[in-house]
Image (cartoon, helix red, strand yellow):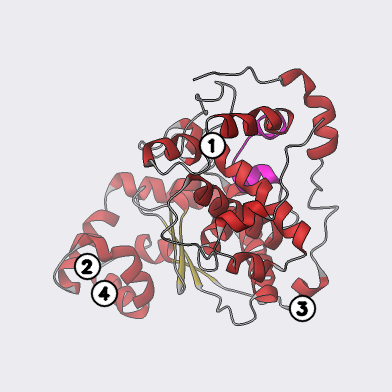
Amino acid sequence: MKQFKFLLPVLLPVAFLFGCNQSNEQCELPSGYKDNLSYIDIIRMENLYFENITKEKILANLESYPEFSKAMFANIGLENQEQLAEELLLIHQDSGMIELYQEVKKIYGDISDIKTELENAFAGIKYHYPDYKIPTVYTFVSGFGSDLIVTDEVIIIGLDYFLPEDHKFQPVDLPNYILKRYNRAHLVPTIVTAISSQFNKTKLTDRSLLAEMIYYGKSYHFTKTILPCTSDELIIGYETEEILGSYANEEMIWGHFIENELLFETNPFVIRKYTGEAPFTDEISPDAPGRIGRWIGWNIVDDYKEKNGLSLTELMEQDDAQLIFKNSGYKPRRL
């Protein structure tokens, strides 16, 4: 399969055209979002499970926070709460877990910024979906057992996964190209992208690469709409150079999909090469970032919504990937 060389020298003009995301200081949320602002409390469950912990306190926590307990501890598989409490007591008295908790507490003692970002995000969602019920938000330290749990009822943030990149505690099961997205700045965009799945309609019978590209494109478009002051880098998890290089080479990238007749490919192994986690998309170029199919899908979806004058809710309801592509008028940018 033919590979291409990314045209990195043209990044400067591309940066001018596409890389000028407004800073948070310059950007204001739409007035309609502000009208839907609801203040939330983030429940710091890690404090309840590490500070002066006893079996009796754990049993009280299990009873007082049943939604959290069900979502967080269901996979332990113990028969009753007495056994669960005994197991959790052993875990949270472990010296390594205590040290991890203390390190998280240093970094995330103050999470007022995360609280504000989530409140703004929920306001945006409620503007478009007035019936949306804001889930209860918890933080926790799981010993790298769970990074994020997002359901209709709860959001549980495993803060130990989001320590700084240079911190001595890091999850051992994540490669560096994924780990670089596990930080404070990416946290709320990642949560909003996960929430988007509640609204992202898709045809389960369409297992094509195009359908997967469009699905991810809709999810990123949702996140960008809800978080208009957030950069594309934080939404898709690319470095700035990867964003700019992709725009500089968009025509070549798209040509690869067309020349190799990939859009209607249904082989999951082939699809994974273009939308799955990877440090780069080697089938196109060693310089092409991984998940490039998702990025192309985002551009197609943006063009479709703009060309057809749709609301966010109308876009998310559209489950026909082929129709979205056909009516997008998508063409790579010529720079």
Q: Which residue is mark 3?
A: 35
Is 235 covered by the magenta stretch?
yes
Q: Secondary structure at mark 3?
A: helix
- Residues at marks 1 and 4, CA–CA distance in whole angstroms: 37 Å
Q: Position of residue 27 (x, y in %)?
A: 83, 56
Q: Are marks 4 and 2 in contact (CB under 8 Å)?
A: yes
Q: Which residue is mark 1?
A: 180
Report which quarter residue 48 is drawn in.
bottom left
- Rate crowding at label 3 as few (under 14), some (14 to 19) or many (20 or more) other CA atoms within 10 Å: few
Q: Is residue 106 visible?
A: no
- Residues at marks 2 and 3, CA–CA distance in whole angstroms: 43 Å
Residue 133, placed above or below residue 307: below
Please tell me which of labels 4 and 2 falls first in the chain. 4
Q: Which residues are magenta?
A: 231-244
Q: Which residue is mark 4?
A: 59
- Residues at marks 1 and 3, CA–CA distance in whole angstroms: 35 Å
Please tell me which of labels 1 and 3 falls first in the chain. 3
Is 94 covered by the magenta stretch?
no
- Rate crowding at label 2 as few (under 14), some (14 to 19) or many (20 or more) other CA atoms within 10 Å: many
Residue drawn at point x = 64 percent, y = 48 percent: 298
Q: Which residue is mark 2?
A: 85
